Image (tube, rainbow, N blue to C red):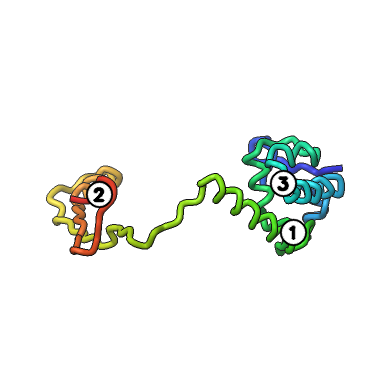
Amino acid sequence: MRVELKGKVGEMMSHIPFGYTIQNGRAVIYEEEAIKIKKLFEVYLSGLSLSEAAQKAGIKRYHTSVARMLSDKRYVEDKFYPPIISRDTFEKAQLERRRRAEALGRIYEHKGNEKKCLNFKFHASMPDNLYDDPFQQAEYAYSLIKSEVILDDNQECYGNSCP
């Protein structure tokens, strides 16, 4: 039987990964779900999509949740969670996810010639006013801070933060 822990306001805690349960304060493998996790990795590596693999494994989750499950390192190694799948299977799944993403053009690689603004200069004038309310004083003090982006010939700026 799967044990669920209650949160502060009666919500189910969602940080216990699928395939595990908590018994006596320790994470243990929940065999019914662990079998589904193993099947998920197996059928995903056989070529099925995320949704199809989850359906075939008997896991009722959306594809984004399935993607997170396939990339969750807790199924391989963790100080708290015992392993459900082998490192080899996990790494093959990561390579397959990367391969599929590249095939669909979903991987953005930096070209190396992109430059960002990294140099900033901050200064603030001395406060002229004093307020009794500390929040109002803090708001006033923060309003006195001025920032300046320092550019050189080799840098390029992005966004609205640059002059």
Number of residue marks: 3
Mark in the foreground, 1 or 3 = 3
The x, y position of residue 11, in whole percent, is 67, 36
In the displayed orientation, state which residue is furthest to the front. Answer: 103
Q: Sequence order check: which comes first, mark 2 or mark 3?
A: 3
SS at circle 3: loop
Residue 119 left/right relative to 48:
left
The residue singled out by tag 1 in the image is: 89
Circle 1/circle 3 CB separation < 8 Å = no
* Residue for badge 2: 161
Residue picked out by circle 3? 47
The amino acid pointed to by label 1 is Thr
The residue lying at 68 percent from left, 50 percent from top is 70
- Where does residue 51 sit, x and y in percent of width and height? 69, 37
Q: Secondary structure at mark 1?
A: helix
Q: Earlier in the sequence, mark 1 or mark 2?
A: 1
Q: Residue at x 81, y 47 (%)?
A: 39
Residue 111, x across and y down, in percent: 39, 59
